[in-house]
Image (cartoon, rainbow, N blue to C red):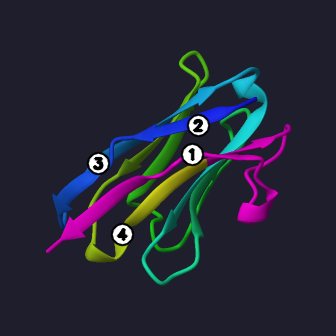
Amino acid sequence: QVQLVESGGGSVHAGDSLRLACVFYGRAFSSYAMGWFRQAPGKEREIVAGINWSGRTTYYSESVKGRFTISRDDAKNTVFLQLNSLKDDDTAVYYCAAEDGPNNAPLDPDEYDYWGQGTQVTVSS
């Protein structure tokens, strides 16, 4: 069984930065593709960034490209999301997700096997 625990959310001002972390509890973290999603009130869950099992391939949505960075530390069973130059539109609950397999991170949330409980990011101008 896998458990994902996110942390690092908070309330910040536009232009500030945050670093989200997602700790993977379980076996074989290094074989999982990982994704960060977000969901704002009244909106569907959307992918923000993904990283494949090896860390060599990443994906970013157009809305965060150049501002957010996803990374993984297999020694710590952790995936990170660095959020820079935050905007009001980045306000959402951020979730990490894990997909079992030597694949690129899926863009479709339905393809993920495990989800964290989410961490709130609130950006005010």
Q: Choose mark 2 or mark 4, whichever is in front.
A: 2
Between the residue at mark 2 and the residue at mark 4, the CA separation in whole angstroms equals 22 Å
Q: Earlier in the sequence, mark 1 or mark 3?
A: 3
Q: Earlier in the sequence, mark 2 or mark 4?
A: 2
Q: Which mark is residue 4?
A: 2
Q: Amino acid at mark 2?
A: Leu
Magenta run includes residue 22: no
Q: Earlier in the sequence, mark 3 or mark 4?
A: 3
Q: Residue at x 66, y 36 (%)?
A: 55
Asked whether the beta carbons under mark 2 and mark 3 sit within 8 Å of each other, the answer is no
Q: Is residue 91 visible?
A: yes
Between the residue at mark 1 and the residue at mark 3, the CA separation in whole angstroms equals 18 Å
Q: Earlier in the sequence, mark 4 or mark 1?
A: 4
Q: Which mark is residue 90?
A: 4
Asked whether the beta carbons under mark 2 and mark 1 sit within 8 Å of each other, the answer is yes
Q: Choose mark 1 or mark 3, whichever is in front.
A: 1
Badge 1, how many Cα within 10 Å: few under 14, some, many 20+? many
Between the residue at mark 2 and the residue at mark 3, the CA separation in whole angstroms equals 19 Å
- Region in magenta: 97-125
Between the residue at mark 3 and the residue at mark 4, the CA separation in whole angstroms equals 11 Å
Magenta run includes residue 117: yes
Q: Residue at x 53, y 73 (%)?
A: 62
Residue linked to disc 3: 18
Asked whether the beta carbons under mark 1 and mark 3 sit within 8 Å of each other, the answer is no
Q: Quadrant of residue 89?
A: bottom left
Residue linked to disc 1: 116
Q: Earlier in the sequence, mark 2 or mark 3?
A: 2
Q: Residue at x 53, y 19 (%)?
A: 76
Q: Amino acid at mark 3?
A: Leu
